Amino acid sequence: MTKPIRILLQPLGKTLEVNEGTPLQDVLFDYGVEFPCGGRGACRGCRVRVLEGTAPISPEEEKLFTLSELEQGWRLACRMSAACDLTLELAQWELSILADESPFQFTPSEGLGVAVDVGTTTVVAQLIHRGTGRVLGVRSALNPQAQHGSDLMSRIHYAIAHQGQAKLTRMIRETVGRLIAELAAANESGEKNLRLVTLVGNTAMHNLFCGVDVKPLSEFPFQSPQDDLMEFTANDLGWDCAGDPVIRFLPCLGSFVGSDLLAGIMATRMHCRENLTALIDLGTNGEILVGGREKILCASTAAGPAFEGGRISMGMRASSGAISSVVAEKGELHCHVVGGGRPCGICGSGLVDAVAAGLDLQRIDAFGRLANGSKAMDLQTPVSVSQRDIRELQLAKGAIAAGLHVLLDDVGASANDLESFFLAGAFGNTINSESARRIGLFDCPLDRVRPAGNTALLGAKMALFPEYDSADSMQAILDRCEHVVLSGNALFQEKFVDEMVFPTS
Amino acid sequence: MSEWNSLYDAILTGDDKTATAVTEEALEKGAEPLELVNQYMVPAMDEVGKRFEEEEYFIPEMLLSARAMERSLALIQPRLAASGAKPIGRVAIGTVKGDQHDIGKNLVRSMLQGGGFEVYDLGMDVPHEKFIEAIQEKDVNIVCLSTLLTTTMPSMKTIIDNIQQAGLRDRVKVMVGGAPITPEFADQIGADCYGDSAYSAVKLARNLISA
């Protein structure tokens, strides 16, 4: 009898159970780890990082990794077999991270700047030449805090119940510091003088980075007493970086809605628009903004990980082998697989498409039930969408759609009155808006929908320049923003249930 | 027995208009209130629960059925009270302090009502002492605690400790539930049982009463 070994995969949050001695190559491929050399230990393509547990170092790994990489836990998946319980970070996740190259207006300034989007799951940093506005480099990493809970609440719980606050703060500061050091080391431009670092993130990320007690975020009314702009020196944060830059975490909008959404407003210029605009950011947490020049309402809701492929039976990130889109043609489902070939899972955009197509083909009814009592809808062998996956999607889209409804109702408008509807974040960029509309994520006309990319990073980058960076211009946005509490809101509760149901056509 | 089957069907399909119409008609024609509850409403909600367990029904269908059941029950309850029929047990239920989520709690409430219990719904974000008051004033047999947030789970332990300190622990059973709750957690904090769904809550409550 061999005993089962549990392997937790980050950032997927997925736990595998395998028999002792199982080669990891056999199981990890299904989760997007690729083996370019075929698993001979000849390349680094299948590298994974051991976050918890131990893995012996093979001669091949000694050759392919530096000493410090080995110390950080980097290993080749093809050299590993299941010997003890493990938590692994899948490096391949990095490929799908959405950076930003959008142009914007700015006044040339001195030196370099770094813009950082501190996400719940991933951290992205860009090095910017403040004279030319050019992006000199980009680095990303998983948010190491994810080891202590993939969603905000479990992370806050860890901070409080396990005295983990200081550890979480240290972890994220170290990670951002490392990314900045890497960017500086790789910088080949003549400019070496780092002047300013701007960080954006939701309120929990702000509080944890800044070392502010997250206890107030743990219960109703979820309002941090300290969520303003906070400034540090490299020394304060224990960073060894030349040029003594000013480091700023931008101010939050209210409750869980953080500076990533302030950045979203700056990037889309929502606060300058005469007509009604909405923005939704679909990440680990879902955020919603509705408004314009006069006033902007904001809200957040735990949308759950369905849009990112998490907690979906065959969910995965949008990488090789993922079904990324599905269309219904002549009563049949046709799938597009990233990289071609046999699919091994489905990512968020594929799930939304699949359910939209299932609704059109009447394989799924308006209540989300699969026709004829079946438990799964086959897409392309061996990938299918299970009844439970559809339920997860119903919860996620129900929460977002209900939140949007509440904010629109507050300004006395309907979705039809929206002039622009921005879909922000990695998922917003890949989702098919027709499918999103079909499942009832929103119901405004399609010609108003605009994929907006990583608006958090773009806004953080804009804040590296004086016209955006001044306390006045940010304060002017903050003054317009009003946070709406969704939990406990009677209309939200009612709409949440209504919006779990799919539109009939 | 099958005379008012349309009441069963209406609750099962969440058709509250038909459910209340049939209930009114049945009561007018002299149907026994308790019989309507036991022969049609309880089995209908049982079936709803089963379908939920089997993933055939989801939250919206369950809420529609619960609403149909609650509206019919509201018509029947005055007659039940007048006839002196006793509920099978009395329950106080609430979402603990710090948490404002109540869809799950409302479903459990409806299922328990549909299952023949008299339920005092204390609402959401309920201060700890309200549970003690309910035990003292309403003479409840079971206290049901709900939370959706990991961060408010510790409140459940505080409430149980408070019940203990007030010397009331022997008078009530405590049932806990909600997305982040596990049977192990229920054990740790000294609850009597953990319910993983609104449907199982009814079975568990019946067991607790008969124990």
Image (spheres, coloured by chain):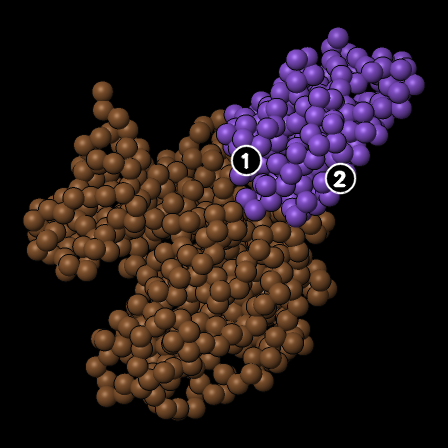
Chain colours: A brown, B purple
Parent chain of label 1: B
Q: Residue furthest right?
A: B82
> Mark 1 packing: few (<14 Cα in 10 Å), some, or many (20+)?
some
Of A486 and B15, which appears nearest the observer?
A486
Q: Position of residue B10 (x, y in %)?
A: 71, 25
Mark 2: which amino acid?
Answer: Glu
Local packing at callout 2 (Cα closer than 10 Å; few below 14, some 14-19, many 20+) is few
Q: Is residue B109 left or right of residue B20?
A: left
Residue A450 appears left or right of A489: left
Which corner quadrant of the image does residue B85 belong to?
A: top right
The x, y position of residue B50, in whole percent, is: 58, 22
Q: Nearer the viewer, residue B20 or A52?
A: A52
> In this picture, is A283 found above or below A249?
above
Whichever of callouts 2 and 1 sits on the residue coming sooner in the sequence is 2
Q: Secondary structure at mark 2?
A: helix
Residue B113: x percent and y percent?
74, 25
Q: Is residue B195 visible?
A: no
Residue at point 15%, 59% (across, down): A67
Q: Which residue in the structure is indicated by mark 1? A: B181
> Residue B61 occupies which quadrant of the picture?
top right
Labels 2 & 1 near each other (Cβ < 8 A): no
The residue to which callout 2 is attached is: B129
Which of the pair A175/A391 is nearer the observer?
A175
